[in-house]
Amino acid sequence: MTIATATTEWIAAISSAIAAVGTVGAVVFALWQVRRQEKTRIDVTCGRALAPIGPGNQVHEFIRLEARHVRGAPLKLEMAFFENMRSERVVVSFLPTLTEPIPKILTSGETLSVAWAAELVAKAAAANGPFRAAFFRDAAGHDHRALFPGVRHRRAGLLRRRLSYVGPSEARTTPAVALDADQCSTRPNRARPTSRSARSR
């Protein structure tokens, strides 16, 4: 076997190996894309709002939590809670006129909105400690959360893996959103409250 022949064979072998790696990589990437598309994603927002409620249409402030199904399989949301700075779950009675029926199964594009009277939330926070988040819990026990209005989070530590929460220093500094009577029905509400969305853990 000459040197030229050996070199040609080595080049052919290396080319075949590279092609095989490329094929495997393409398959893995395709499977990742499919899995990503199938993974259920729920966006959750939490904010303060003002609306005319009750006799005389007096304007009241309330806290609204909304979930929007972005993609993936249908998901059943069973309940909504608050979470204080000690990671404890706190239950507060809903505001019936602004809360959709729950539990509810969401499919792509659908929303679920619940609301609490701001006064009741303030009393619950005074009794249980400041709230840092509000969240929906699904049928599998997974939580889909958003930061409580006025709360911010930051990462600390060497690798920034430790998550800490700041506030609410004064939650009422978060501006309330004024809603018309049409937006206060129990129909799915697509208006975005003040806090950004949070994905499920």
Image (spheres, rainbow, N blue to C red):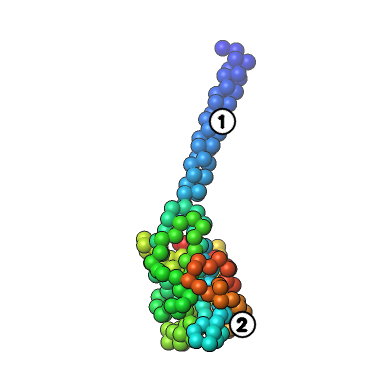
Marks 1 and 2, how far apart at CA: 59 Å
Report the amino acid beneath label 1: Ile
Label 1 CA crowd tier, 10 Å (few <14, some 14–19, many 20+): few
Residue at 56% across / 29% down in the picture?
A: 19
Residue at the extreme top = 1
Kindly tell me whether residue 160 is visible in this rendering.
yes
Report the amino acid beneath label 2: Thr
Residue at the extreme front = 56
Pointer 1 with pointer 2, Cβ within 8 A: no
Residue at 55% across / 82% down in the picture?
A: 52
Q: Is residue 97 left or right of residue 169?
A: left
Residue at 41% across / 66% down in the picture?
A: 137
Residue 21: where, in percent of width, then height? 53, 33
Q: Quadrant of residue 167?
A: bottom right
Quarter of the image for the N terminus: give it. Answer: top right
In the picture of the structure, the residue carrying the numbered disc 1 is: 18
Kindly tell me whether residue 157 is visible in this rendering.
no
Quarter of the image for the C terminus: give it. Answer: bottom left
In the picture of the structure, the residue carrying the numbered disc 2 is: 173
Dot 2 falls on a residue whose secondary structure is: helix
Residue 128: where, in percent of width, then height? 42, 84
Question: With respect to residue 137, does 75 lie above or below?
Answer: above
Dot 1 falls on a residue whose secondary structure is: helix
